[in-house]
Amino acid sequence: MEVSAPDITPPGPALVGIDVEPQYVLGFPMFVGITIGSVPPGASLMRLPLPSPAALRGAIGIRLWRPGEAEPFFEEAPTAVVDADLSAPSFRLRAGEVRRLLVEIAELLPDDLAAGEVDGVLLYGAPPHVAASGRGRLRFREPTGAERASLDELRPEVEAAGSFGRWLRRPPSDPTRLAPPADPGDPLRYPRLMKYLIHGPEELDAVDPARLRVLGGVFAPEACGLAAELQAARDPGTFAGYAQQVKAAYPGLAAWMDAIAAGQSEIAWARSHR
């Protein structure tokens, strides 16, 4: 049987997993965990756009509905361009592989978004190869008084950096006040912890892994990845076994574990250039 060209669908990315917070706080970062696979599942994809907590690079979009309505009231589509000549960060997804990425998407939200519930679909890719997640419920609340005060205190630094994702990479304006987060309910616990791991006074091999306990929920895979970073710094001889445990629990973190094993840890690199 002949198959006409329009019936042939080229391989492309798929969003095979989405992790969100039970509730987000307006004005604060909105971290989402995405797991990227391929369609069909056995396909190998050579160049996929690589967003990060610090930069979406046009690879992420969002579509929002009011609960019960059929038509979305807001959409921001991905705009990434994957071109070798542009040196845009990208990665290869081998056959059967999945990749877990943590992204911060608050910049995509409409400015007039109010507290309450909306339905959302996350978009990923470089047009025309864009994958969409299933439609899910997102909840937003206003910040408490203490949270507003914390946000106001950090606002000059964050605005200078451009985003919370970029802020966590920048050296602290006052190193003596840099401290790791202790509250698992802190909307800024992930960027605060990453800033401490990169710019804090302790060497990585001296950081207490208990500091990672604030990273539950959407950050649970990253907590395991960061524990592997600390294990590699503290006891390199046991890292390989620990990395295998992380890969078994979170296959999407395999590339991260391989990077640490190859001496290409992003945290170690960031610390060496601080």
Image: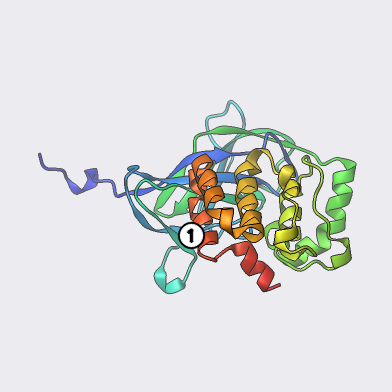
Rendering coords of residue 21 (x, y %): 66, 38
Q: Is residue 175 rendered to the left or right of residue 34?
A: right
Q: Nearer the viewer, residue 80 or 258?
A: 258
Reading the image, the residue beneath label 1 is 80
Q: Is residue 109 rendered to the left or right of residue 249?
A: right
Q: Is residue 44 rendered to the left or right of residue 168?
A: left
Residue projecting furthest to the left: 1
Which residue is at a point 17% across and 45% down the rendered structure image? 4
Rendering coords of residue 81 (x, y %): 45, 62
Q: Which amino acid type is marked by label 1?
A: Ala
Q: Residues within 10 Å of mark 1 (few under 14, many from 20)?
A: many
Please state, as top left, top right, bottom left or bottom right, where the C terminus lies in the image: bottom right
Rendering coords of residue 255 (x, y %): 49, 55
Q: Nearer the viewer, residue 272 or 115?
A: 272
Which residue is at a point 82% across and 59% down the rendered structure image? 155
Which residue is at a point 67% across and 72% down the rendered structure image? 272
Q: Residue 28, can we see it?
A: no
Picture layout, residue 54 above or below residue 15: below
